[in-house]
Image (spheres, rainbow, N blue to C red):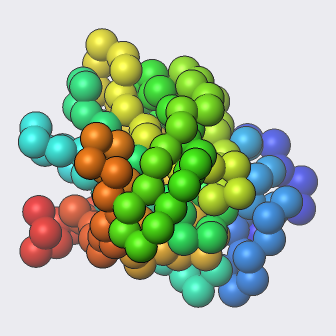
């Protein structure tokens, strides 16, 4: 952990700036807002697929999960929640669009969603969300591949995925495309 955070320019400094044992909301937000990294700093963690965006683990502790997501042009996440956890997203490269939703009604595995907010984030900006704010979809809305760093506090093993057209909710197990730079069996 760093007492006086100025700028975080490496993955090693980023990991060392986060308390691995206890979730600290204010500290984590300050750390994410102090990042000044780009694709070159994240290269060992960047793995790409044309078919879908990839989730690449940097570090996972009992207090947080730090991952790099690689997005080709036009790739997007499903509408999803965060299982009650806090999520920060730093844009290391490209432009990302976030569309937020609220659940208007929910019964069993069916729901009706309403779009509430849409924001474009550019390189160097940080976004924050938790389930109290809403659900969201993240998409690469730029003209080049994008790279984002996500900090989840606490780690998330599953999330709910929402199908806007069918009004259905499905639980999805979250996996990594790579762990600490090495491809996994999911790659």
Q: For the point 74% across and 76% down, which residue is it?
A: 23
Query: Closest to the observer: 5 or 134?
Result: 134
Q: Quadrant of the C terminus?
A: bottom left
The answer to whether any part of residue 23 appears in the image is: yes
Query: Closest to the observer: 65 or 171?
Result: 171
* 162 relative position to 65: left or right: left
Residue 122 point in image, percent of width and height? 54, 21
The residue positioned farthest toward the top in the image shown: 143
Q: For the point 41% across and 23% down, which residue is it?
A: 94
| Residue 65 drawn above or below residue 125 | below
Residue 28 point in image, percent of width and height? 74, 60
Q: How many marks?
A: 0
Residue 72: quadrant of the picture: top left
Residue 67: quadrant of the picture: bottom left
The residue positioned farthest toward the right in the image shown: 4
Q: For the point 28% across and 41% down, which residue is it?
A: 165
* 175 relative position to 81: left or right: left
* 115 relative position to 25: left or right: left
Residue 116 point in image, percent of width and height? 61, 32
Residue 13: quadrant of the picture: bottom right
Q: For the point 54% across and 33% down, which residue is it?
A: 115
Residue 161 point in image, percent of width and height? 36, 59
Q: Quadrant of the N terminus?
A: bottom right
| Residue 25 drawn above or below residue 5 | below
The answer to whether any part of residue 64 appears in the image is: no
């Amino acid at each position: 952990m760093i007492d006086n955070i100025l700028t975080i320019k490496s993955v090693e400094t980023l990991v060392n700036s986060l308390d691995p044992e206890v979730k600290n909301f204010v500290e984590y937000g300050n750390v994410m807002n102090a990042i000044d990294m780009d694709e070159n700093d994240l290269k060992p963690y960047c793995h790409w697929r044309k078919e879908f965006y990839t989730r690449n683990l940097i570090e996972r502790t009992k207090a947080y999960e730090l991952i790099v997501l690689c997005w080709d042009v036009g790739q997007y996440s499903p509408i999803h929640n965060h299982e009650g956890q806090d999520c920060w997203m730093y844009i290391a490269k490209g432009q990302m669009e976030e569309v937020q939703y609220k659940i208007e009604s929910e019964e069993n595995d069916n729901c009706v969603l309403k779009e509430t907010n849409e924001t474009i984030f550019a390189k160097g900006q940080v976004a924050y969300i938790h389930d109290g704010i809403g659900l969201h979809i993240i998409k690469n809305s730029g003209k080049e591949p994008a790279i984002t760093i996500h900090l989840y506090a606490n780690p998330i093993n599953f999330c709910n995925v929402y199908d806007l057209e069918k009004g259905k909710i499905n639980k999805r197990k979250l996996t990594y495309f790579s762990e600490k730079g090495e491809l996994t069996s999911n790659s």
